[in-house]
Amino acid sequence: MKRVVKGAEPRAFADWKAKANEDWQPSYGTLQNPEKRALHEALLAEQEGVCCYCGRAISLADSHVEHFRPQETYEELALEYDNLHASCIRETEPGAPLHCGHAKGSDLDQAKSVSPLDLDCERRFMYSAQDGAVFPVDKNDESAVYMVGLLKLDVTFLRDRRAEALKSVFDNQFVSSATDDELIKLAEAYRRPDADGHLTGFGHVLSRYAEQLLAP
């Protein structure tokens, strides 16, 4: 899971909500452009261009506004900016594997959940460079196990792309010769955005793998 650091909600979105009166109350269902686009763009910008769950690179064209706590269950949070993120997959297609926000849907056991806002959310998961698999650092971490299953983070589609990203950086020659200092710098580098404010797709996975190699 990718950690998200929330910023301020976009002015257009805040101003639209502030129009509430006795005759009209804002709801997510009535949110339209340009305010909805402004919201979506703000979420993408603060996430530095990657999905809040799997961490792959996303844009306006291939992502959607995601409610971490489902609006069907938590109606009072439907317009709360801290509950809103950008998740991959804009439109679902018949037969296509679902993962991340569209896999979660309206199901969420709050007591078991791990939020992208949690300070330690990334470090509760680890990865295999061999096949891109994701699994909890602590096999007894029921919440981490739950989120992998709920978000379908281990579907073949994501595993293959994580494996490709990992193998492109951590080949056998590098792993056998890398120093601790090199691994630390690598982990830090993949958590920094480029000049355009974009993170590398699956960059947090690359950072975590470097940290795994550092573990005693």
Image (cartoon, rainbow, N blue to C red):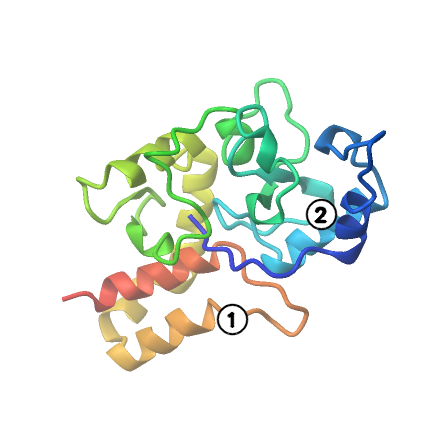
Instruction: Name the foreground residue: 93 vs 161.
Output: 93
Query: Which of the 4 image quarters holds residue 7?
Result: bottom right
Residue name at image x 59 percent, y 52 percent: 57
User: How crowded is the residue under tag 2: few (<14 C-alpha within 10 Å), some, or many (20+)?
Assistant: many
Residue found at the very far front of the displayed protein: 22
**Position of residue 110 in the picture relative to residue 211 (left or right):** right
Instruction: Name the foreground residue: 148 vs 21.
Output: 21
User: Of tags 2 and 1, which is closer to the observer?
Assistant: 2
> Does the rendering let one see residue 171?
no
Instruction: Determine the secondary structure under disc 2.
Output: helix
Residue found at the very far left of the displayed protein: 216
168 up-or-down from 154: above or below:
below
Residue name at image x 60 percent, y 44 percent: 84
Instruction: Determine the secondary structure under disc 1.
Output: loop
> Does the rendering let one see residue 61?
yes
Residue name at image x 83 percent, y 43 percent: 19
Residue found at the very far top of the displayed protein: 94
User: How crowded is the residue under tag 1: few (<14 C-alpha within 10 Å), some, or many (20+)?
Assistant: some
Q: Earlier in the sequence, mark 2 or mark 1?
A: 2
**Disc number for residue 40:** 2
**Disc 1 residue type?**
Arg
89 up-or-down from 12: above or below:
above
Q: Quadrant of the C terminus?
A: bottom left
Residue name at image x 75 percent, y 51 percent: 14
Q: Position of residue 11 (x, y in %)?
A: 77, 57
**Disc 2 residue type?**
His
33 up-or-down from 50: above or below:
above
**Position of residue 151 in the picture relative to residue 85 (left or right):** left
- Report which residue position mark 1 lands on: 192
Is the residue under label 1 in contact with that under label 2 (CB below 8 Å)?
no
Q: Position of residue 181 (x, y in %)?
A: 29, 81
Q: Position of residue 91 (x, y in %)?
A: 68, 29
